[in-house]
């Protein structure tokens, strides 16, 4: 089944595809924010590297909804929402924590937030906490390698595993997608107006 997954929740953007019975993975590492968010470049990269690629042949679409960069998740949401209107096809949002836990279902998935806070998946539920001490102790963990967490019995994964695992998940018959397609599903943002 031709499927596309986008993950823009980190400084590096990832696109994973299952297309014409082959898997493709693209890593867009750009220092400049303007270049990082260059859709024309991303789309031309897909077309140059995948024989006969066309969005019209995509059957399933999904994105990483976070935790991670909320702006990145919104960009991915907007891109797939636009494609879904044009192609008249649904798209799905997946928790980065579910993706992190995909190959390690018995481990607690943990992602460190930008404010020294934490997001974790435990007993089929995503949680938010302000301290590592609030996460269940004495368990096995799966984390992102750049989060630099010092936990015993931990497996570290690279950022690109999120998009690869979501591609696996979207191709499975049972759907582990979030009930809502919107990003920011764990912790509401508290905006403070500057005066």
Image (cartoon, rainbow, N blue to C red):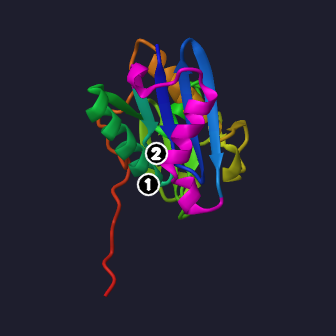
Q: Within the magenta stretch, is there residue 48?
A: yes
Q: Picture coordinates of residue 191 (x, y %)?
A: 33, 69
User: Would you say residue 108 is visible in this rendering?
Assistant: no
Q: In this view, does 65 lie above or below 2?
A: below
Q: Is residue 28 magenta?
A: no
Residue named by callout 1: 70
Q: Give the range drawn in magenta.
A: 31-60
Residue at far bottom of view: 195
Marks 2 and 1, how far apart at CA: 7 Å
The x and y percentages for residue 160 are 63, 37
Q: How crowded is mark 1: few (under 14 residues within 10 Å), some or many (20 or more)?
A: some
Identify the residue under disc 2. 66
Q: In this view, does 144 lie above or below 172?
A: below
Please report the residue visible at 59 percent of the width from the left and 25 percent of the height from the top: 50
| Predominant SS along the magenta part | helix
Q: In which quarter of the image is the C terminus?
A: bottom left
Please identify the quarter of the rendering in which residue 188 is found. bottom left
**Residue 119: x, y in percent?**
50, 48
- At x 34%, y 83%, the residue is 194
Q: Quadrant of residue 156?
A: top right
Whether residue 189 is visible to the viewer of this picture, yes or no, is yes
Do callouts 2 and 1 mark residues in contact (Cβ within 8 Å)? yes
Which structural element holds mark 1? helix
> Which of the 4 image quadrants contains residue 25?
top right
């Amino acid at each position: 089944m031709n499927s596309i997954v986008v993950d823009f929740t980190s400084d590096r953007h990832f696109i994973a595809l299952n297309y014409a019975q082959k898997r493709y993975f693209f890593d867009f590492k750009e220092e400049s924010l303007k270049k990082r968010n260059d859709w024309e470049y991303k789309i031309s990269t897909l077309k140059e590297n995948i024989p006969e690629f066309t969005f019209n042949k995509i059957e399933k679409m999904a994105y990483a909804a976070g935790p991670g960069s909320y702006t990145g998740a919104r960009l991915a949401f907007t891109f797939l929402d636009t494609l879904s209107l044009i192609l008249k096809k649904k798209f799905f949002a997946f928790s980065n924590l579910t993706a992190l836990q995909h190959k390690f279902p018995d481990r607690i998935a943990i992602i460190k937030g930008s404010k020294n806070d934490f997001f974790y998946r435990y007993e089929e539920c995503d949680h938010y906490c302000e301290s590592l001490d609030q996460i269940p102790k004495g368990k096995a963990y799966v984390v992102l390698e750049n989060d630099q967490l010092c936990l015993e019995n931990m497996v570290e994964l690279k950022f690109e595993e999120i998009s690869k695992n979501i591609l696996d998940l979207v191709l499975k018959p049972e759907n582990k997608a979030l009930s809502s397609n919107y990003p920011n599903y764990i912790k509401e943002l508290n905006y403070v107006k500057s005066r």
